[in-house]
Image: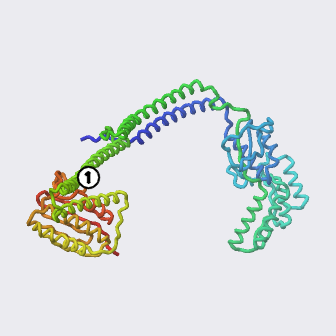
């Protein structure tokens, strides 16, 4: 047999939504790609080399200045040289310099994403501490440095290769190394005295750290030979350099002139029809899905209205196994339950009327006969009237117990009790009845342990079961009470119950004898009451029977006393 694949409502909704989304995304991607290609072809992008040059120029500026306050002229110069918009902000997005302001007097919005982060301490392109090539230095800068060295009497040499710089001579004193640093600082893009200022900060920092600084070849060292001392020295040198370098900024690059966006109207003729087509497709798909979902819901609504109006025969067709199918099944189960309960209610009213009518007719007829002088109010007649009134009293009490159970007000007082004691008490009470019916009434104890019961209610339960068994066991039969660790069985070898009647055994007013004669049983409430009492004990009452062989009622699940 080929199994049909079932798709839930949620799966179908998700599939349709994903389908619409895929189509929309694909169309949007195609439009965006086409528009981007047109935009790229319509404007000339600057080369990567230009971007790197701008970045390096800003890194060099940041490495030789403590702030970006004076970077405006450099930004203007870069804009003029590269024909690019150059803007820098701090890391919180506040504008520091923008070539738009310099060139136009008004600034356009910045691009959404920064081009790069300019950090002179950790530059990602090039290095800030390399000497500037000679061909980029003013012609008199090298001469000024050499003249400074000569004036201060500092020995130095200059190699013959291109871009060579002065290097310290041999056997220089620490003062001569200091003078060498001061004279050559401008060759590295720093102001004169920059290196010595850093050295002074390092000396102060090392001293505060508890170590002894010492000058060596124009730099600072420590006399202590330990990892901690060297680590402190490295940290001091880093801090001293960083304090003279501008903080990181965000770099934004763009075109100098206003550029048209990818959706500037040139693609509107293509975009508009496609967007309309997507709207129509989405609307149609949504309508079809809504119609498919609401059709069974409308049928359910109509059936529910009819059910509320009293037509308990209403059912709906189950067309699938998805959520709507489950809901339809639930509705049908509800309608069936309501219809069955209504039938039981009507039957119960009829049964109650029957149970009340017979004793009332008997009492009324007897009293009229006495009044007419047909009967004498003899002890026998009075005993008959008492029997009928007792039957009515039992019926009223049984109905009252069921009403209390239905309202959740059935109360029992659980305590440690002995099931053997309960069984013996019931057997003693019913022994005369068993002897008159020539039925053997016995007790079998498999295991006896204290359990949590209400002894009075438990005697009522077992008494009801024993009484039923005696009424349905022929002369010469046996009724046996079995006591187990967690409950009691009452078994007989009497008439038995037909299999089709077993589900109705615990129903109110149900009796196997449809004529409901007094000789074959009571009102049909005993087992219904026993069931509620067993539930109140936290246990279960079940029945097993074979027609012609006998019946066993089982109380199980009683909790042990602790």
Q: Residue furthest front?
A: 373
Residue 559, image x, y percentages: 32, 70
Q: Which of the two residues, 111 or 170, is positioned nearer the viewer here?
A: 111
- Residue under the point 50% across and 28% down: 280
Residue 370, image x, y percentages: 18, 57
The mark tally for this picture is 1
Q: Which of the two residues, 371 or 181, is positioned nearer the viewer here?
A: 371
Q: Label 1, secondary structure: give it.
A: helix
Q: Is residue 318 left or right of residue 279?
A: left
Determine which quarter of the picture holds residue 483: bottom left
Q: Residue furthest top?
A: 269
- Residue under the point 71% across and 74% down: 225
Compared with residue 51, is residue 38 higher up or lower down, i.e. above or below?
above
Compared with residue 73, is residue 214 higher up or lower down, i.e. above or below?
below
Determine which quarter of the picture holds residue 5: top left
* Neighbour tally class for label 1: few under 14, some 14-19, many 20 plus, Cα within 10 Å: some
Q: How are the colours assigned in the image?
A: rainbow
Determine which quarter of the picture holds residue 196: bottom right
- Residue under the point 87% across and 51% down: 143
Which part of the image, by quadrant, shows the C terminus? bottom left
Let me know if residue 318 appears in the view. Answer: no
Q: Which of the two residues, 206 or 37, is positioned nearer the viewer here?
A: 37
Q: Which of the two residues, 106 or 440, is positioned nearer the viewer here?
A: 440
Q: Is residue 539 left or right of residue 72?
A: left
Let me know if residue 544 appears in the view. Answer: yes
Residue 449, image x, y percentages: 27, 75
Which part of the image, by quadrant, shows the N terminus? top left
Q: Is residue 279 left or right of residue 98?
A: left
Residue position marked by numbered label 1 in the rendering: 352
Residue 293, image x, y percentages: 41, 36
Q: Residue furthest right?
A: 151
């Amino acid at each position: 047999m080929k199994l049909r694949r079932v798709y839930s409502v949620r799966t179908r909704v998700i599939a349709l939504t994903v389908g619409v989304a895929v189509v929309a995304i694909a169309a949007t991607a195609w439009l965006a790609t086409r528009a981007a290609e047109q935009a790229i072809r319509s404007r000339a992008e600057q080369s990567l080399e230009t971007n790197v040059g701008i970045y390096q120029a800003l890194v060099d500026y940041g490495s030789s200045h403590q702030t970006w306050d004076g970077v405006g002229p450099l930004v203007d110069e870069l804009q003029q040289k590269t024909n690019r918009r150059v803007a820098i902000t701090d890391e919180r997005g506040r504008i520091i310099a923008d070539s738009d302001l310099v060139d136009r007097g008004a600034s356009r919005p910045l691009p959404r994403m920064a081009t790069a982060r300019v950090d002179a301490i950790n530059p990602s392109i090039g290095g800030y501490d390399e000497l500037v090539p000679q061909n980029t230095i003013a012609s008199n800068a090298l001469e000024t440095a050499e003249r400074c060295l000569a004036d201060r009497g500092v020995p130095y040499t200059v190699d013959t290769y291109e871009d060579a710089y002065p290097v310290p001579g041999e056997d220089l004193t620490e003062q001569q190394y200091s003078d060498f640093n001061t004279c050559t600082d401008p060759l590295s893009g720093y102001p004169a005295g920059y290196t010595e200022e850093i050295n002074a900060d390092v000396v102060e920092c090392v001293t505060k750290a508890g170590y002894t600084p010492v000058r060596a070849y124009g730099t600072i060292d420590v006399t202590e030979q330990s990892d901690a001392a060297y680590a402190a020295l490295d940290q001091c040198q880093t801090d001293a350099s960083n304090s003279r370098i501008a903080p990181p900024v965000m770099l934004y690059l763009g075109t100098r002139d206003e550029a048209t966006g990818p959706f500037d109207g040139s693609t509107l003729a293509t975009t508009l029809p496609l967007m309309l087509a997507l709207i129509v497709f989405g609307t149609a798909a949504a309508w079809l899905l809504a119609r498919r979902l609401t059709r069974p819901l409308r049928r359910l609504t109509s059936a529910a209205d009819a059910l509320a109006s009293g037509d308990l025969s209403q059912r709906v067709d189950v067309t699938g196994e998805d959520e709507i199918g489950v809901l339809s099944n639930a509705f049908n189960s509800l309608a069936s339950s309501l219809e069955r309960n209504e039938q039981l209610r009507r039957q119960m009213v009829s049964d109650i009327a029957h149970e009340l009518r017979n004793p009332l007719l008997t009492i009324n007829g007897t009293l009229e006969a006495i009044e007419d002088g047909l009967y004498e109010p003899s002890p026998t007649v009075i005993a008959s009237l008492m029997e009928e009134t007792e039957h009515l009293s039992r019926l009223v009490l049984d109905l009252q117990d069921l009403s209390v159970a239905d309202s959740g007000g059935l109360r029992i007082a659980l305590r440690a009790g002995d099931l053997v004691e309960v069984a013996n008490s019931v057997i003693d009470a019913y022994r005369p009845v068993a002897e008159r019916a020539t039925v053997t009434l016995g007790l079998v104890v498999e295991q006896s342990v204290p359990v949590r019961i209400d002894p009075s209610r438990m005697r009522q339960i077992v008494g009801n079961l024993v009484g039923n068994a005696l009424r349905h066991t022929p002369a010469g039969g046996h009724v046996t009470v079995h006591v187990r660790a967690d409950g009691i069985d009452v078994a007989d070898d009497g008439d038995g119950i037909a299999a089709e009647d077993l589900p109705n055994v615990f129903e109110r007013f149900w009796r196997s004898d449809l004529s409901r004669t007094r000789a074959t049983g009571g009102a049909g409430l005993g087992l219904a009451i026993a069931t509620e009492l067993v539930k109140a004990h936290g246990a279960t009452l079940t029945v097993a029977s074979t027609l012609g062989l006998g019946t066993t009622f089982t109380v199980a699940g009683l909790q042990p006393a602790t």
